[in-house]
Amino acid sequence: MKLAQKAIQNNIDILEKAKTIALNDRHVLSDPVSSDDPVSPKYTLVIVLAVMLGGMLGIVVVFVREMMRKVLCTSQEAENKTGLTVFAEVASAEELKTTPEYREGFKVLRTNLLYQLENAANNRAMICSPSPVIEQDHVIIQLASELAEAGKKVLLLDADLRQDKMFKHFDTAGEHGLAENQLFPTITRQYP
């Protein structure tokens, strides 16, 4: 019974408010209700959400950069992408320069290279690395010395026109490079 009376009273209030709205341009629909608790940011929630979103964003950035990277990481990956055979993997010169495994890696490379070149149509080999950070000039010089020790004829040609690093390894002055010798063949160089 009380519920029905309350509903009827609520309808009467709504009709009275509608009547006052129709008569006036301005009206108050209901009185403001304020909470007893002060309104303030929830610092713990904000910090937790910021840490979670920052971590997720960092993970997404790492995955996107890894997907966009064009560096070959393993020899199997290099063989699959290029279709060429990897004869040996040589560790970085700075890490293992003094260990016997470092020298042994070059001997394995020399042996595999000589075996493959026996049946090849020509006796040329190209040495490359998966990234510009790795010093392939040191690898090439070490391989050339291994081949020379095995009694093979070796022609070591530095065709890098921007950075001539081979001069530093052989303690010679790099006055003229490959481009100068090709353009001006009359220039002769005396090596010690």
Image: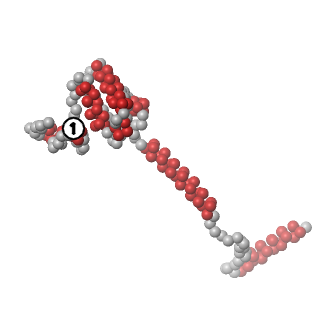
Identify which residue is drawn at 39% across, 39% down. 71
Q: Residue furthest right?
A: 1
34 to the left or right of 45: right
Give the residue type that dot 1 points to.
Phe
Q: Is residue 2 above or below residue 106?
A: below
100 to the left or right of 164: right
Q: Residue furthest bottom?
A: 24
Is residue 82 in sight in this rendering?
no
Identify which residue is drawn at 70% across, 77% down. 28
Q: Residues within 10 Å of mark 1 (few under 14, many from 20)?
A: few
What residue sits right under mark 1 in the picture? 170
Quadrant in which residue 73 is drawn: top left
Q: Residue furthest top?
A: 119
Tell which of 15 and 34 is nearer to you: 34
Q: Position of residue 15 (x, y in %)?
A: 78, 74
Which quarter of the figure is the N terminus placed in?
bottom right
Which quarter of the figure is the C terminus placed in?
top left
Quadrant in which residue 117 is drawn: top left
Q: Position of residue 52 (x, y in %)?
A: 57, 54
Identify which residue is drawn at 51% across, 48% down. 59
157 to the left or right of 76: left
Quadrant in which residue 137 is drawn: top left
